[in-house]
Image: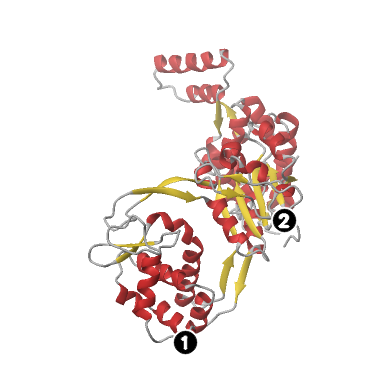
Amino acid sequence: MPNTLVNIIYTGVAGTGKTYQLLQIAKQYTDYLPTMDKAQLLAQLLHNLSWREVICLILLDFKHQQQELVKVPEILAHEFFIAKAEHNERNKNLSNTAWSVLQMHSSIDSQTVDYKNRSSQAYFDKDNSGAWFLLPECLPLLTDLSVQLLEYQQAQVAPIAITKPRFSMVSFHQAYGYEEFVEGIRPVLGANAQGQISYGIQDGAFLQLCQRAVNDPEQRYAMLIDELNRANVSRVFGELLSLIEPDKRSGQAHAMQVNLAYSGRPFSVPANVDIYATMNTQDHSLAPLDIAMRRRFRFIDCPPRPELLSTIKVLSDDNNSNENDPVNEIDLAQLLKGLNQRIIESLGIEAQLGHAFFCAVQDITQLQTVLIEQIIPQLVQVTGGQVSLLQYLFCDEQQPFTAQFIQDGQAVLSQSNSHNEQSNFTHQNAVSNLHQTLLNQGISHYKINADLLARTGAFANAATYQRLYG
């Protein structure tokens, strides 16, 4: 765990374990609590809760059971209410307590509750039948209670060590915005007694985490962001982009506070919230983002790590085949090193392949699948499908036509025509003219070797893949 505030971005090409790194960090921000019996769980859940919070928790519990409307006798009979009364050594006037709390925190616009000394924050209302429900606009204020309720329910179902996460993980994408990350006006489906759609200002993932951190200042919390550069970062963070700087945090030397865009309430980022993110350096839109983030984050490079890869065995049908003979082995680390060396020479360091592509490869069939479905399509994209460049990457130039990973489409067509005397001449001519037109436009036409697709011929032998080491 860090002792001081941390803002870190892990950068690198695809498949270098950046997301895996976030998952490992998440474990550092997770508390593992010992198993407790039901009485202990109830005591822990209700220990610091007020009567208003207990009734909110009860209504949340009914809501999770698809019961939106709850009458006072049901509240009094709930295990949370009974346990709270026992904890406070109360056994009289409990009904009055429930009614008083419900009315005090009822909506000022209620058509069914007539009460003078209302609290400034409303949580409840009741319908004409006398059944109470939670106001939809208060649900974002009950996030912590919802988390506690879920933990309590899970602990009862599976009596195992309880985990208490102190992190929130999100993945940015093109449509991700301020409303999801900070706050925004969003619909709440069936939130009121009539089951109608209502709208309210709801806290986003980052604000919810910050509120938890403020209530637990002795612990560190973490915001984990995967694919940071996939969204418009300035739009997502909004006015908080300055507040996340270490010296601008709450309680720091140059602490800043802003009024949030939708709610208008004052806000500053707590100093016990760390931010970790990943960024794919193959994205060409990174330049402005990189400049904006340099003074707010430390950048840690995540290069490909071929040393993590294994060696696979390739045995032929020959009874004399020896699995320990190096001739029958494919060293995935050497294969990745060789490919990346040629990629760097011809396309640059940002076009490299990550080791994660090969981590799950245990045999030659899986290797062939990875090459066909992942590696070759990615390299086709970054090379623009140039046959000569693709053949250089796969060391195909000096190889027999049947042993080339990538073949020239025109050559494939010519061979196909020469071996098919029954082919329609007009059709052959039309296809040849099409390929010639593509070549004249500077568009190379590549083909993946049919034997590689069929997992036969030269591609059933280890030697074909060993040549990629160089």
Q: Is residue 224 left or right of residue 116?
A: right
Q: Between disc 2 and disc 1, whose residue precedes? A: 1
Does 216 sit above or below residue 383? below
Q: Residues within 10 Å of mark 2 (few under 14, many from 20)?
A: few
Whole-percent x, y for residue 187 in the image? 38, 47
Q: Amino acid at mark 1?
A: Glu
Whole-percent x, y for residue 225 in the image? 60, 49
**Which residue has dot 1 on it?**
89
Q: Is residue 136 left or right of residue 316?
A: left
Q: Amino acid at mark 2?
A: Asp
Mark nearer the viewer, 2 or 1: 1
Q: Which is nearer the eye, 409 or 343?
A: 343
Q: Which is nearer the eye, 406 or 232?
A: 232
Q: Quadrant of residue 108?
A: bottom left
**Marks 2 and 1, Cα distance to the nearest angstrom?**
78 Å
Q: Residues within 10 Å of mark 1 (few under 14, many from 20)?
A: few
The disc label shown at residue 15, or none: none
At x 34%, y 78%, the residue is 95
**Residue furthest front in the image:** 116
Q: Is residue 4 left or right of residue 62?
A: right
Q: Quadrant of the C terminus?
A: top right
**Which residue has dot 2 on it?**
325
At x 35%, y 49%, the residue is 198
Whole-percent x, y for residue 243 in the image? 66, 45
In what element is the residue under mark 1?
loop
Whole-percent x, y for residue 341 in the image? 75, 37
